[in-house]
Amino acid sequence: MTVSIAMIPARMGSQRLKQKNLMPLHGEPLIVHAIRKCRDAGMFDEIWVNSEHPAFENLAEEEGVRFHPRPADLADHNATSEQFVAEFLQNHSCDFLFQVHSIAPLLTTTDLRLFATEMQKGDYDVLLSVVDEPLEAFCRGVPVNFTLAEKTNSQDLDPVRRISWSVTAWRRDTFLSAVRAGQCATYAGKVGLFSINRLAGHAIKTAEDLALAEALYSIVHGSKDEAKA
């Protein structure tokens, strides 16, 4: 029997939008939406909030999930996600870890269930949520998926697959093996890509992002919580 953990990272010291994980959306803090989405998905054996700040411990307790106290040196803006994911996995045994970001509130419970199912049934070490962009794209001034020699209809283009980080999954053993070997663990092993729509990939980084999510929340989730509708 495999064990799957959902881990919700929640740092207090965000830079562009202060304390963004506590920002209210549709009457509840962003972090609470993420917790309830993980719980309602019914796919995880354990749900953990990962933070350095006791405010999130209180919220986790109120919502009936667990709290992992992140070391303070992994909570500043210089710490990488790979570092705090590794620290979490070194302290919690599981087969699969699902990182669910609270700053992607338009990711639905259905999206999360489908993603978790794909990771659990697939032969992946990493599963990344991506938004497919079927439009002409440049990188450093060079065409990525088209040529300047001719005009191609957008429906005929290979889409650029943008990683959203709304939800990510790792096989614990592969991740930690890469850490011990001094390799990049985030992309270690067999990588899979799971398409989500643009709204599910919408990340809250600014006040404008939050206002847009508020405007779209009921359209995406319905008048009631999407998982309960």
Image (cartoon, rainbow, N blue to C red):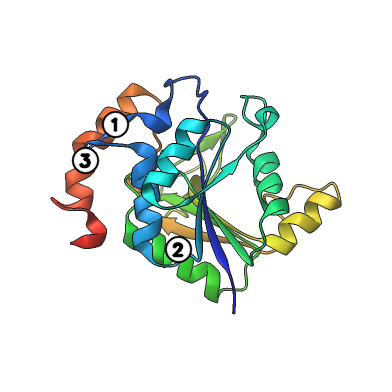
Give me the disc on residue 24: 1
Disc 3 from disc 2: Cα separation: 22 Å
Q: Which of 120/22 is in front? A: 22
Determine which residue is flagged by label 3.
Answer: 216
Spot occupied by residue 126 in the image (x, y as percentages of width and height): 62, 59
**71 horizontally vs 229: left or right:** right
Residue 3 is situated, as x and y percent measured from the top left of the image, at: 58, 69
Residue 223, placed above or below residue 191: above
Q: Residue at the right extreme? A: 181
Circle 3 SS class = helix
Q: Position of residue 100 (x, y in %)?
A: 47, 49
Extreme left residue here? 223
Q: Quadrant of residue 19?
A: top left
**What is the x, y in percent for residue 34?**
39, 47
Q: Which residue is mark 2?
A: 115
Q: Which tag, 1 or 3, sits closer to the chain's start?
A: 1
